[in-house]
């Protein structure tokens, strides 16, 4: 909550805190981080609690003749239960109930701390959960909200700061339904616009440092040039950088790379992550890596691929767990030097399972028969129309057992635990971040910013540039990349124009906002209008049988395909 560490007041407003789609009332939890919480006077506040639901398909699958053969290690590895059970097993219920209780307790702590409640014990919280819906007046009386305005007060708050007369009028109009005296702003900006401004500011700062580097190289080659820069007001070594911004860490261009591992871990995710790690490995400016993991798990092979690449990285790695970092996500985290998690992060799930589906019963119901010719007893292991035999069953069981033991050994080595200690924490059981901190599976509680701060303090001089990976490639960069792979008259012209266009965009004082179509259209139009390219670029092979814009777009795509 920023208001606890900053004198700046913060205002939140909602028409109501009772929407069916807001399970657990996340909107209200966010509002609690603000110093002034407003709710429309006829709004409602619902603190019903947290729930978890699981569908079970066993009866459905039996009805249609589908079997799921599950091989797992860990009695709490409950993901495949949806195929094999009709309701929660004892372990599944125990694990899920613990998660619900932990998340509920965390929600209570957030409200108690952010709303500065005293004497708000578990009994009071239980009564709130039991009560149901709170009206606006009840919410204010309990201190759950601060103000009950008839409508969003933002526009009136902005007007109140124009002059004293208007402020006096607004105070009379609003009374105690907002805090006009503490509201200092005179204009508003959307979060998207504010984020865009910060991004442009950061981009401009990085560009200034690149210019600084080029000026330094030129000045090193010529003392006359260095003297000229000084006369023009750009003395060495700061050149174009303001004195207060100039520091040794920036001059050395230290970097912290943030790599995002998101979604189910599969081959595509592994390839993308490994590609980023390999590029970072060869960059001496990158002093540390923050691995931001948001995944429930996935392929063991893909997880192992990412883990081994992490271990081969010369730079230290700090793991930042997002909302979910379990199973394969934790598998990868074992290769990090420090692990951060949110109090509510769902992590752990140290266990392994495999499922082989058998659709032979389904096929038989519909008069379909499938015959097999194989060169060995394991050849049809993953064929859903081949029934499970003893050798396949034994092999799959051994694979799961071996992978589980390896997973536990990774955890033991990473966390400095004995194998029997890991076994007590493993078995597929999931933990909240707070619990994981208590049992030694993570090092510290905190979000991405805290992980970055840790990397800055421990692995850099404190002012390293933060860059995100994998980097996105815009249209102009893509065109340049294509040009670099080929030679020839037209291609050289295209390369020239691509560079010209990119320089125009970068040097423009006005922000250039180009989508994919506009960028390629601009590129081709520049080529067609440039006399230097007249001899090398021909478009006689295009028949315009559509509107001009569509034909131009089609021609661009056709040209790209030929280049590739």
Image (cartoon, helix red, strand yellow):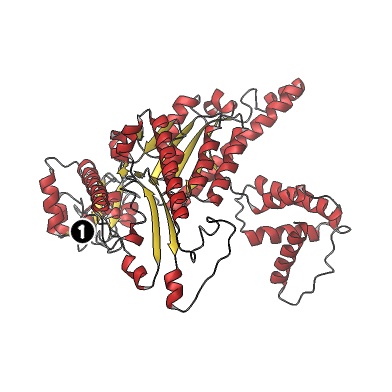
x%, y% of residue 446? 35, 37
x%, y% of residue 251? 59, 26
Q: Say which quarter of the image contains residue 347.
A: top left
Regarding residue 476, the answer to whether it shows in the image is yes
Q: Residue at x 85, y 52 (%)?
A: 488
Q: Residue at x 55, y 32 (%)?
A: 313
- Give the answer, above or below, for where 149 lies relative to 329: below
- Give the answer, above or below, for where 65 lies relative to 192: below
- Left or right: 62 with respect to 43? right
Q: Nearer the viewer, residue 82 or 11?
A: 82
- Left or right: 234 with respect to 1? right
x%, y% of residue 29? 27, 50
x%, y% of residue 270? 54, 46
Q: Which residue is mark 1?
A: 46
Q: Quadrant of the C terminus?
A: bottom right
What number of labels is visible?
Answer: 1
Q: Residue at x 77, y 74 (%)?
A: 544
Q: Residue at x 48, y 39 (%)?
A: 291
Q: Nearer the viewer, residue 252 or 238?
A: 252
Q: Quadrant of the N terminus?
A: top left
Q: Say which quarter of the image contains residue 535.
A: bottom right
């Amino acid at each position: 909550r920023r208001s606890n560490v900053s004198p700046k007041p913060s205002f939140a407003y909602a028409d109501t805190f009772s929407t069916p789609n807001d399970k657990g009332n996340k909107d209200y939890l966010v509002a609690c981080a603000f110093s002034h919480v407003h709710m429309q006077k006829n709004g409602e506040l619902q603190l019903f609690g947290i729930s978890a639901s699981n569908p079970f398909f066993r009866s459905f699958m039996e009805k249609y003749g589908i079997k799921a053969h599950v091989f797992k290690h860990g009695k709490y590895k409950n993901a495949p239960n949806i195929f094999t059970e009709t309701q929660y097993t004892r372990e599944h219920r125990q694990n899920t109930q613990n998660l619900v209780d932990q998340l509920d307790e965390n929600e209570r702590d957030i409200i108690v701390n952010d709303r500065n409640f005293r004497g708000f014990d578990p009994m009071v919280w239980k009564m709130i959960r039991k009560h149901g819906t709170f009206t606006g007046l009840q919410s204010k009386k309990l201190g759950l909200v601060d103000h009950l305005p008839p409508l969003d007060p933002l526009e009136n708050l902005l007007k109140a700061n124009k002059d004293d007369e208007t402020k006096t009028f607004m105070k009379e109009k609003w009374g105690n339904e907002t805090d006009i005296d503490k509201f200092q702003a005179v204009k508003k900006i959307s979060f998207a616009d504010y984020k865009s401004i910060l991004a442009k500011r950061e981009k401009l700062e990085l560009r200034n440092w690149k210019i600084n580097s080029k000026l330094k190289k030129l000045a090193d080659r010529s003392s006359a040039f260095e003297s000229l820069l000084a006369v023009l007001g750009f003395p060495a070594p700061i050149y174009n950088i303001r004195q207060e911004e100039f520091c040794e860490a920036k001059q050395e261009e230290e970097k912290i790379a943030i790599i995002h591992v998101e979604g189910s871990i599969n081959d595509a995710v592994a390839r993308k992550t490994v590609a980023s790690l390999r590029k970072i490995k060869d960059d001496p400016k990158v002093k540390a890596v923050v691995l931001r993991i948001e995944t429930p798990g996935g392929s063991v092979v893909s997880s192992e691929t990412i883990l081994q690449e992490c271990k081969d990285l010369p730079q230290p790695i700090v793991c930042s767990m997002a909302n979910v970092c379990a199973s394969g996500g934790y598998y990868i985290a074992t290769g990090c030097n420090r692990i951060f998690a949110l109090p509510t992060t769902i992590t752990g799930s140290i266990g392994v399972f495999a499922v082989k589906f058998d659709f032979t019963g389904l096929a038989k119901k519909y008069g379909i028969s499938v015959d097999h010719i194989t060169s060995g007893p394991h050849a049809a292991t993953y064929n859903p129309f081949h029934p499970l035999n003893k050798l396949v069953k034994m092999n799959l069981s051994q694979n799961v057992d071996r992978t589980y033991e390896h997973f536990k050994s990774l955890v033991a080595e990473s966390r400095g635990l004995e194998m029997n200690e890991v076994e007590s924490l493993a078995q597929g059981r999931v933990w909240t971040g707070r619990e994981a901190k208590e049992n030694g599976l993570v090092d510290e509680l905190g979000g991405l910013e805290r992980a970055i701060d840790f990397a800055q303090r421990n692995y850099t001089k404190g002012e390293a540039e933060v860059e995100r990976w994998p980097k996105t490639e815009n249209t102009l960069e893509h065109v340049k990349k294509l040009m670099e792979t080929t030679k020839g008259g037209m291609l050289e012209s295209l390369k020239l124009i691509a560079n010209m266009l990119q320089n125009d965009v970068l040097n423009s004082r006005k922000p250039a906002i180009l989508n994919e179509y506009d960028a390629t259209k601009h590129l081709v139009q520049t080529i067609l209008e440039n006399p230097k390219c007249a001899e090398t670029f021909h478009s006689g092979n295009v028949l315009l049988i559509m509107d001009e814009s569509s034909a131009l777009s089609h021609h661009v795509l056709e040209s790209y395909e030929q280049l590739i």
